[in-house]
Amino acid sequence: MESNLGTRSCRSVRGALGLTVSSAALVVAMFAGPALAADSTAAADTTTPAPVSGGGAGAEGTEVSSIVVTAESAAGAAAAPTKASLDQTQPESIISRGYIEQVTPEAGGWTTVLTVAPSVSGITSNGGGIGDYNVVSIRGFKDGQFNLTFDGIAFGDTNDPTHHGADYFPASTIGAAVVDRGPGAAGDLGQENYGGAIHFFTPDVSDTLGAVQKFTFGNFGTKASVTTINTGEIPQLGGAKLLLNFDERWSDGELSGSSGHQYNQMFKFVAPLGDKVVLTLFGTHQYNFFHFEDSSGPGQTWQQTLLFGKNFSMNNDPNSEHFVGYNHELKRTDFEYADLKYQVEPTISLEDQLYTYWYSNKTKSTNDLTGDSGPDLNAAGTNPNTSAPNVTKPPASASDIGGYDKLNEYRVVGDIVRINKDWSFGTLKFGGLVEGSRTFRHNCFIDFTLGGAPDNKFFPPKYPFTTNCKLLEESSWLQGQFFADFNWRVTDKLTISPGFKYVDFTRGVNATHENVGGGAKNQALVATNNYASPLYFLTANYKIMPYWSVYAQAATSFLIPSLSSLYVTGANLQAVQPATTDNYQIGTVYTRGAVTADLDAYWINATNIEVACTVPDPTVVTGRSAAFCNAGKARYSGVEGEAAYAFDFGLSIFANASVNEAEQLATPANPANGIPTATVQQRLADAPGWTAAVGGIINHGPWQGSLTYKRVGGWVDYNGGATFHLPGYDTLDLSAGYDFGHHVKIKLQVFNLLDTRAVSSFVPGGNTVALMPAGGLGSDGQPDQAIYTYQAGRQVELTLIGKF
């Protein structure tokens, strides 16, 4: 049947890191020894070591300045919001600081920087820039299926490599972004080049003394302050320079009860150590508190929409599961690195990047957000807000509000070494990564009507165990990635780049209590899994003309299974391996004068996709428990393009579009291997079929302005035998600024100018189909218990800017 729907402190891994640094030093000595003996005082070509790159433009390890300079080689590209590089070897879109400052929300996060690019989808469901209300996808690959890097360091959660839009990096800390729509080069490091990568880069540190102060005021009670200070070069420190950035914001949010506040502090220190070495120290810390229904939020049921409108989230009623006092998250993050670049001699460079990042999420939430206004929907027995009794739980008072206390806290420590060796005919780039993590997680039942204290009286576990916690877990990983890329300059026009990477990843879990077997029971779980895989890369770039290039790529990729793959009795029986893809892409880039344009096509075959299955389990009556098996296949294909034209008087017009197909291929039944039923070929859920953007940006005298339109096409969702078609969403955004001189500027921005409130995500309820009458819809024409998310309404921000 089908329907159409509307619109945590942790130990480091110093031994492993020391091994990496020592190994790198030995390798450098092998190359550099003769050269240093011949001329130990030879000067490098420049006072700043050459950038160390993992691949083409936008690859991890590349200097942000080199990305922008390479891409913005002509007026048209310099003015375009997204552009490609003539040197690229896979489809990518480069977004520079100028566009971020002029067009994106001042109270935005890293997600808001990206959405203009082709094949990128995602839009916030709450105004004000506070809280985890936005995720992005690329070509239908979901968050958790592509790498996210910051100055070349891949980061993400440690249970699975997903990300949170409100954490780590507000927009003011981002100097540029590159959307790599492909697996990259071998030197692009991370757990999930499966669906590509999004690379963020810190702002450049200025050579001159200066400061910028911004104050932003907006609807939904939004207030923000960004203070940026550059010391310029300090002669007493040999020319070292420091950038400081302080980002503070507060908002009530558009959604009811969704207020919060966020503070971020960032520094970047760059010091030349002689004429061959540059040391960069970076650090950022963020505090983030916001009210949020964590159980399955954000979102609301159709009935809630009818009763309370699209802005409903929480209320002020202590007798309600939606009470704002029962639903909140406190997050802290930090991210630091020390980067040493050494120009060993004119043809050899070394980069060593030691890093760490930390995430802490302390959440309290009620169990369910689907009740109209009252108590716990999961309670059994008579309950006016319960559409169907939950017979697995004993009767509970209708005034009971059940919930949970959740912790997710981890520390990751790693080291990346990159070495470049140049010859007249090419460049060898090689190195590797060693990284370890340690994570603590819990999820414990609480009864908010007893003041939020844990109590088994009302919420006993389904199976007896000694605590009220369904999750008490420590986990870790230790991984190594080693790579080599060779950029062979066959002619002055043709470069061919083969690459190889080997990944070895070991994950362990030591849990006192763990939900296993698909959540069917709770038990201790101590287990490890190892994933090891070679990966292969081959790219080519040919310059037809200095301003026109073509490129091609054939590459493999992988996706490390999530921690949940261990959530099964006898985890050593699990044979789940990384999902992999074979990628084939071709494209062309033209950049000359006022014009920039690029076009690409891709074909991606995915295998080893995890599907639900069962594995032997002697502890249960049936002899088998729910698990995951590598049996699924998928295919992604499409065409993408972008173009811009710059007029002499400061106006640039642009357009981009993509047609994206993402299909799950048919999987035959294999009862002998625990796969009882076959799956049919069908469109992947939550994968938009197309994207488009068009607009104009003007910089003329004291005036700045932009008008941008972005449309994300429709997608589908499934539940049981039902298919739900979502039509997509769009937004029209306006920005206008005026520079008064005397270091004062004002900017007005309006996002979602037309105040459209389309459905931006849809999660079918577990009982959606079962509760539907014939025809597949509830009596009001919509599926029951499904969770709808709507795009945020019109947001207005006024920013005052002072430059000193």
Image: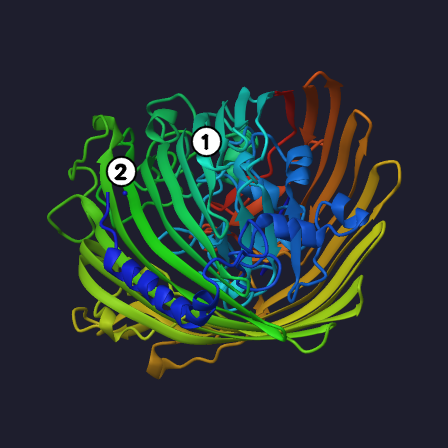
Image quadrant for the N terminus?
Answer: bottom right
Identify which residue, 644 or 528, lies in the foreground: 644
Q: Which residue is mark 1?
A: 236
Three-letter amino acid code at the position of disc 2: Asp
Q: Are marks 1 and 2 in contact (CB under 8 Å)?
A: no
Residue 781 visible in the displayed image: no
Q: Which residue is mark 2?
A: 405
Q: Residue at x 36, y 35 (%)?
A: 331
Measuring from the top left, give residue 198's x and y in whole percent. Answer: 55, 53
Residue type, mark 1 in image? Gln
> Which of marks 2 and 1 precedes in the sequence?
1
Q: Quadrant of residue 3?
A: bottom right
When the figure is inspected, residue 692 is found, relative to residue 361, above or below; the finding is: below
Q: Callout 1: helix, strand or loop?
A: helix
Which residue is more in the foreground, 383 or 646? 646
Pointer 2 local density, CA inside 10 Å: few below 14, some 14–19, many at least 20: some
Q: Determine whether the residue tagged by mark 2 lies in a helix, strand or loop.
A: strand
Picture coordinates of residue 737 (x, y %)?
Answer: 73, 25
Reply above or below: 407 against 192. above
Residue at 71% from the left image edge and 58% from the top image edge: 658
The residue at the far right in this view is 648
Q: Is residue 236 visible?
A: yes
For the C terminus, the image quarter is: top right
Residue positioned most to the bottom: 672
Give residue 739's position: percent from left, percent from top: 74, 22
